Image (cartoon, coloured by chain):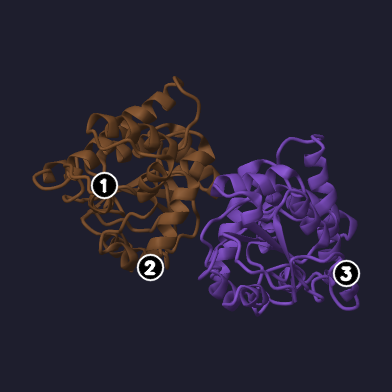
Chain colours: A brown, B purple
Amino acid sequence: MARLRDAPKAVLFDVFGTLVDWRGSVIAGLSAFGAARGISADWAEIADSWRRAYRPSMDRVRRGLVPWTILDDLHRDALMNIARRHEIGPLDDADCEHLVRLWHRLAPWPDVAEGLGRLKSVAIIGPLSNGHLALQVSLAKRNLFPWDVTFGADLFRHYKPDAEVYLGACDLLGLAPDQVMLAAAHNDDLAAAASFGLATAFISRPAEHGPGTGDRAKPAEAWDIVTDRVGGIAEAFGV
Amino acid sequence: MARLRDAPKAVLFDVFGTLVDWRGSVIAGLSAFGAARGISADWAEIADSWRRAYRPSMDRVRRGLVPWTILDDLHRDALMNIARRHEIGPLDDADCEHLVRLWHRLAPWPDVAEGLGRLKSVAIIGPLSNGHLALQVSLAKRNLFPWDVTFGADLFRHYKPDAEVYLGACDLLGLAPDQVMLAAAHNDDLAAAASFGLATAFISRPAEHGPGTGDRAKPAEAWDIVTDRVGGIAEAFGV
């Protein structure tokens, strides 16, 4: 692992996939919903479809084709389409709300709480996710993430990888980009952060996309830190 | 004390005077600076003058006479004037920065950490201050405030009592104003919050402005909760 001499002033974290197991949690939530309603379906495929809608729906916002829209609303629209396609509907408003809120209750990877606790002793820590602030608050509350600062994409009205998110967070912290590190399980997120001058930590999460997808969890570049646990970042800074 | 049946979803806190003893901390910091430099002055009067410049300087921003300016910069401008008037200068840039940063290291009232810890078990808690986000992060880090969400005036580019701050925070939390409570030691802040539909908690801080000023620490209206400790709010919700 690369070893940096000094900890950055702040370490900001991607959240979906990096800190929380969105896939396992969403499959579990959908399955429980199906069981309660007597609906059987390929819930893993539905969870994956739902996630596949994520990037294109944000890209429509990023390209200005639709006005600023928070992730709950993007999730709701995608869910309606998927429910139709998989014939698991009709879903009423309460069903939709329940399922959209599954994304507020995602479970963490097992190393996260311990790693964040250690890192907090040497750096400001916070989420830098495409989730909105209310969603980050829900996840932090459920999972006891001990954030020093809470960012949400709605503070910037932009989605990653837009510069406004990375540089907006640095600016609000009163820090230069090279005083801030992004930690993420995704090479494209880190590439954007690096292009704007932030330090980078890659956290490998081979289980993010399910069995047989571990190849996507490999570092594509020589990031400042490469690890498989949040605690690995703390160790690189000697804590 | 009024007893509310249900806790609001979120309790947001004014910070200067409500959670931290700005006056005692700033006097101590100025005195230490003076001792190190061999400057003697009425540091209590200087701290009070500095604070008196606070509201008028924010009001110039609120009326649009100057563009959006964060509190560090308002503090720096006011300090330069005061230093000239009290002949404690000239202050170089490093001195100014050191003194402006005193506002990032204010000490809490003794009940705060314990009270916030209890309240956090039943509500989302966060600061809603005229300080900017970086300043709130500094204060939380120094004082171990266990915030679930961190707001700063710069997220809204408005200062209290502008509606944008109170309603902007509710909106980012995805909550209606009546699901959110403002806790503050200042009647005017609570009056604004109440006018926008938020619930209110008055925390009496008779020592905020120094000896003989306790009259300013009395509730001017029948706020939803009146107490003299953060823990009093937790108790009103049965925790």
Please rate how many residues cluster around mark 3, counting C-alpha atoms within 10 Å: few if below 14, some from 14 to 19, many from 20.
Answer: some
Report helix, strand or loop for mark 1.
Answer: loop
> Which residue has dot 1 on it?
A185
Considering only vertical position in the picture, is A183 above or below B86?
A: above
User: Residue visible at 82% across and 57% down?
Assistant: B188
- Would you say the residues marked 1 and 2 are in contact, meaning their CB atoms lie under 8 Å apart? no
Residue type at the position of mark 1:
Ala
Q: Alpha carbon of mark 2 to alpha carbon of mark 3: how far?
A: 40 Å
Q: Residue furthest left?
A: A212
- Would you say the residues marked 2 and 3 are in contact, meaning their CB atoms lie under 8 Å apart? no
Image mark 2: chain:
A
> Which residue has dot 2 on it?
A117
Quadrant hosting residue A138: bottom left
Could you say where residue B104 lies in the image, as x and y percent from the top left? 63, 61
The label shown at residue B119 is: none
Q: Alpha carbon of mark 1 to alpha carbon of mark 3: how far?
A: 53 Å
Instruction: Decide if residue B9 is on the left or right side of residue A113.
Output: right
Residue type at the position of mark 3:
Arg
Of marks 1 and 3, the one in the foreground? 3
User: Residue visible at 51% across and 39% down?
Assistant: A154
Q: Which of marks 1 and 2 is nearer the N terminus?
A: 2
Considering only vertical position in the picture, is B106 above or below A131?
A: below
Could you say where residue B128 lies in the image, as x and y percent from the top left? 65, 56
Q: Do the residues indicated by labels 2 and 3 lie within the same chain of the protein?
A: no
> Which residue has dot 3 on it?
B216
Image mark 3: chain:
B
Residue type at the position of mark 2:
Gly
User: Residue visible at 32% across and 68% down?
Assistant: A114
Q: Alpha carbon of mark 1 to alpha carbon of mark 2: how far?
A: 19 Å
User: Residue visible at 65% across and 79% down?
Assistant: B111
Q: Can residue A13 be seen in this view?
A: no
